[in-house]
Amino acid sequence: MLRLVLIMPLAWLIISDGPLLWIMIIVVLAIATDYFDGRIARWSNTESEWGKVLDPMADKLGGGMVVAALAIQGSIPLWFLLTLAIRDIVILLGGGIIRMKTGQIVASMWSGKVAVTAVAITALAALLRADAPVLEFCLWTSTALLVYSFLRYMVRFFSLLGASGEASGPSA
């Protein structure tokens, strides 16, 4: 929940070109809360279905808001924000459909985690005002990984729905 609270001040600081030190403090705090939240939940055996939904949603919302703030500021192109947003919305809707059809809450995939890490590196490069060739490389690498992970999620989506349809048998 703390990560959700940190999103607005972080986005405001980015849009208003606030002090980089404060931006980094909030980012490090958000990363730490994400890390320790997962560790504590696994250590104490308190992982919950709600946590499986809320944690990645906070990650997506936080990352999306940072990229949106960077796009508003002009540090990242709008097409990158749209690519990220469309991918995340479709994956979220797909997860909702799987939940409704199968009762399963599916965990994030490693390809998605790698793609989101690449987006975080791209956002960091933009925040640090990396040279144009470095930022371009980050943008295109992140985009390729976002597309790859999206395709992997789609394969899993149709596989799970296909397995669900086979398990229920033909309808009359």
Image (cartoon, grey):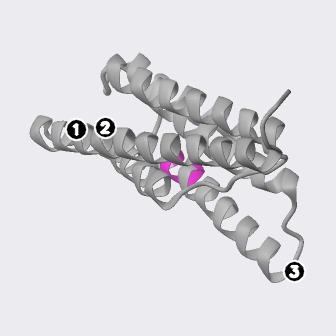
* Left-right relation of 6 to 22: right
Residue 161 higher or lower than 50, as above or below: above
Say what amino acid the circle numbered 3 marks: Ser
* Left-right relation of 78 to 44: left
As rendered, which of 154 and 118 lies closer to the eye? 154
Instruction: Residue 146: give x, y in percent of width and height.
Output: 38, 41
Q: How many other residues sit within 10 Å of disc 2, few (<14), some (14-19) or many (≥20)?
A: some
On the image, numbered disc 1 is attached to which residue? 140
* Left-right relation of 126 to 96: left
Q: Judging from the image, what secondary structure is the residue with disc 2 in?
A: helix
Instruction: Residue 94: give x, y in percent of width and height.
Output: 64, 34
Choose the circle earlier in sequence order: 2 or 3. Answer: 3
Q: Residue furthest left?
A: 133
On the image, numbered disc 2 is attached to which residue? 143
Q: Label 2 vs label 3: CA separation?
A: 37 Å
Seen at 14% across and 40% down, the residue is 131
Say what amino acid the circle numbered 1 marks: Trp
Q: How many other residues sit within 10 Å of disc 3, few (<14), some (14-19) or many (≥20)?
A: few
Q: Quadrant of the C terminus?
A: top right
Q: Is residue 23 magenta?
A: yes
Residue 8 visible from this viewpoint: no
**Magenta span: helix, strand or loop, mainly?**
helix
Residue 125 visible from this viewpoint: yes
Contact (Cβ within 8 Å) of mark 1 with mark 2:
yes
Q: Judging from the image, what secondary structure is the residue with disc 3 in?
A: loop
As rendered, which of 14 and 95 lies closer to the eye? 95
On the image, numbered disc 3 is attached to which residue? 44
Say what amino acid the circle numbered 2 marks: Thr
Instruction: Residue 6: give x, y in percent of width and height.
Output: 68, 42
Instruction: Residue 154: give x, y in percent of width and height.
Output: 50, 40
Residue 80 higher or lower than 46, as above or below: above
